[in-house]
Amino acid sequence: MSFDPNMTANTVPTDWRAYSGVLSRRVFAFAIDYVLVAVLCFPAAIAVFFIGVFTLGLGWLLYPILFFVVAGLYFGLSLAGRSQATPGMRAMGIAMIRLDGGKIDFVTAIAHLALFWILNSVLTPLILLAGLFIERSRLVHDLLLGTATIRTS
């Protein structure tokens, strides 16, 4: 099941096949992305260590928020990039779009990530079941930001 791959970046697909199987692909993309974020935390931790040495210990205050900074930069830069997808999303053949036809920018990507974390911590991961009942398999944070996830392959 595929859809027209020759769509422009500003086109919102109406074909149901563009949204078919997106939820399961999002789950696997999530796992891939968080493994990559965890791997990126190691060199970031080494960099924070040296920053802490040069700032006489002040830089070590970054350790408690290191994961959030790395994840924010990872998701913000990759979702706002040319492919509108993280490496995990690209591996699973999906991308994120805005329903108004615009491109995902860095602020929208960070807001998407923050809303995902907040809603999952407050309302439990059961809110992910909303994707089974909402049009285009959108999740709650997608509804709030006007985004959707589509298949690219």
Image: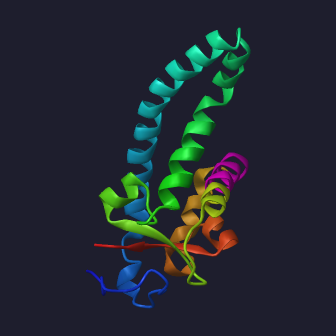
| Residue at the limit of the structure toward the bottom, as seen here | 14
Q: How is the image coloured?
A: rainbow
Above-or-below relation of 1 to 53: below
Which image quadrant: the C terminus? Answer: bottom left
Counting from the top left corner in percent of width and height, residue 20 is at 37, 77
Q: Is the stretch drawn in magenta largely helix, strand or loop? A: helix
- 56 is within the stretch colored magenta: no
Q: Is residue 108 left or right of residue 70?
A: right
Counting from the top left corner in percent of width and height, residue 86 is at 43, 55
Residue plotted at (44% across, 80% down): 9
Above-or-below relation of 26 to 50: below
Above-or-below relation of 9 to 108: below
Above-or-below relation of 12 to 52: below
Q: Quadrant of residue 115?
A: bottom right
Residue plotted at (45% across, 33% down): 40
Residue plotted at (31% across, 57% down): 91
Residue plotted at (63% across, 9% down): 53
- Report the front residue among 65 and 77: 77
| Residue at the limit of the structure toward the front, as seen here | 54
- Report the front residue among 14 and 97: 97
Q: Magenta stretch? A: 113-123
State how many labels appear: 0
Q: Is residue 77 left or right of residue 127?
A: left
- Report the front residue among 34 and 8: 8
Which image quadrant: the N terminus? Answer: bottom left
Counting from the top left corner in percent of width and height, residue 151 is at 36, 73
Counting from the top left corner in percent of width and height, residue 131 is at 53, 69
